Image (cartoon, rainbow, N blue to C red):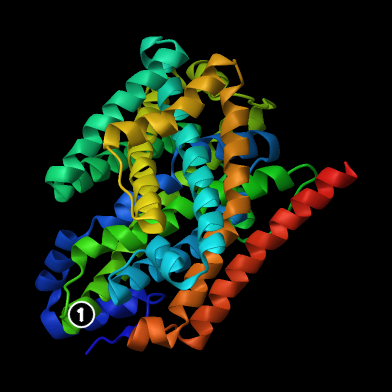
Amino acid sequence: MITTNTLSFSPFKLFQESVKQNGLGFTIKRIVTFLGPAFLVSVGYMDPGNWGTDIEGGSRFGYSLLWVILVSNLMAILLQTLSAKLGLATGKTLPELCREHYSKPVAIFLWITAEFAAIATDLAEVLGGAVAFNLLFNIPLFYGALLTGAIVGLILMLEEYNLRRLEMIIIGMVAIIGIGYVFEIFLAQPIWGDLAIHMVTPTLPVGSTLIAVGIIGATVMPHNIYLHSALIQSRRRADDDAANRKALTLSTIDTFIALNGAWLVNSAILIMSAAVFYNNGLEVTSIQEAHKTLAPLLGPLSAGVFALALLASGLSSSTTATMAGQVIMEGFLHFRINVWLRRAVTLIPALIVIGLGFDPLQILVMSQVSLSFQLPLAVIPLILFTNNKVIMGEYTNRKITTILAFIAAAIIIGLNALLVWQSIMG
């Protein structure tokens, strides 16, 4: 029997054990029908904020920061698996557990910071959608942001009627992003030997700390940690522990597939930027500039695919960011607002930023850095709760799992401290 102690960091072993018990055909069918929650989460790992940090990182530092994306993805798989496990074990979301187990002042503080994180996240997503509409149809950014907000609101209405359909729409958008970047990499023809070395060789070139922290902030995102614990509830069966143990196995595989797909996309964005811009001596300072530069270097079709993938990224990630904001509000306050009002709350900051004429790429990068600072406030409660036997029962973390999770938190906090120190020292 597959138990919770098999936990999530050996998905191949979980797959092999399931095949041995149930057969290959049944196992694949179960996995395919289960897929969804982690894919909704994964779009936050390939959102326009990632595009901003990955494009700037690749154009300025070549392949040097590929290892940061790999490390970030490993941390993401670990933390998202813990979030899903928390939801399956307790039937509650991470914000709900924070409200129950912390004092009111602490819970309010965590709620406020989580809301700021959701707003910063959606700022990046809406900006990405607006830029994509501008590149594809020459729609001004302000109206592109309004159009992005309206489309996302319509998509979110599906959640009220059929969550599975919403999951399929998001998976379709993920497929568009992935196929788009397979095409871009094919045209860019990177130096595979160089990128393989930088994938596993940690280096921080002078001036790259801000981008490195931004990549982590764009990859391991606090709103996704809150969201996954809620999305997994659709796969949970009350008073059926055997079914929930199987769901934990399938959730682990779901997370492994979805987030590794996101890792490939993020790596592809940085690789494309390094191969096309850095290797040609071009330092790209905006997404629009990246789009314009791609056309003469790789052809107009490449620029069109770039913009289409960006649009899919902005729409899908803005959808899940709004869902996360609702999960945060419901969990901490036990209060739910209309989806259109929620959409308006997170849309207004983006409209203000666009109206003031700030550079979209710099806003994307800085929004991701701000998320990295908020991340420990979501990660540490997650680790403490999943390591608590009273809360988790037989689903309690193994010792090695808790150690790895705290190492991930330490890396995040350490990089943030390094960024602050470098900023003070100039």
In the rendering, at what x and y percent does residue 31 appear? 19, 65
Between residues 375 and 418, which one lies in front from this camera angle?
Answer: 375
Residue 416 drawn at (x, y percent): 70, 54
For the point 50% across and 28% down, which residue is it?
Answer: 349
The quadrant of the image that shows the N terminus is: bottom left
Residue 21 as seen in the image, left or right of residue 417: left
* Quadrant where the C terminus is found in the figure: top right
Q: Percent position (x, y) of residue 17?
A: 24, 83
Q: Horizontally, is 50 left or right of 414 in the view?
A: left
Label 1 packing within 10 angstroms: few (<14), some (14-19), many (20+): many
The amino acid type of the residue labelled 1 equals: Ser
Q: Is residue 70 visible?
A: no
**Image vertical order of residue 191 relative to residue 363, above or below:** below
Q: Is residue 240 visible?
A: yes
Identify the residue at image location x=42%, y=22%: 130
Residue 417 placement, left or right of 340: right
**Image quadrant of residue 394?**
bottom left
**Number of numbered markers:** 1
Residue at image x 56%, y 62%? 106
* Residue 54 against residue 225 in the figure, above or below: above
Residue nearest the viewer, comparing 217 with 152:
152
What residue is pinned by disc 1?
Answer: 18
Work out whether 415 lies above or below 48. Answer: below
Name the quadrant containing residue 157. top left
Q: Position of residue 194 (x, y in %)?
A: 62, 49
Residue in view at x 27 percent, y 37 percent: 338
Check the image and report above or below for 22 versus 417.
Answer: below
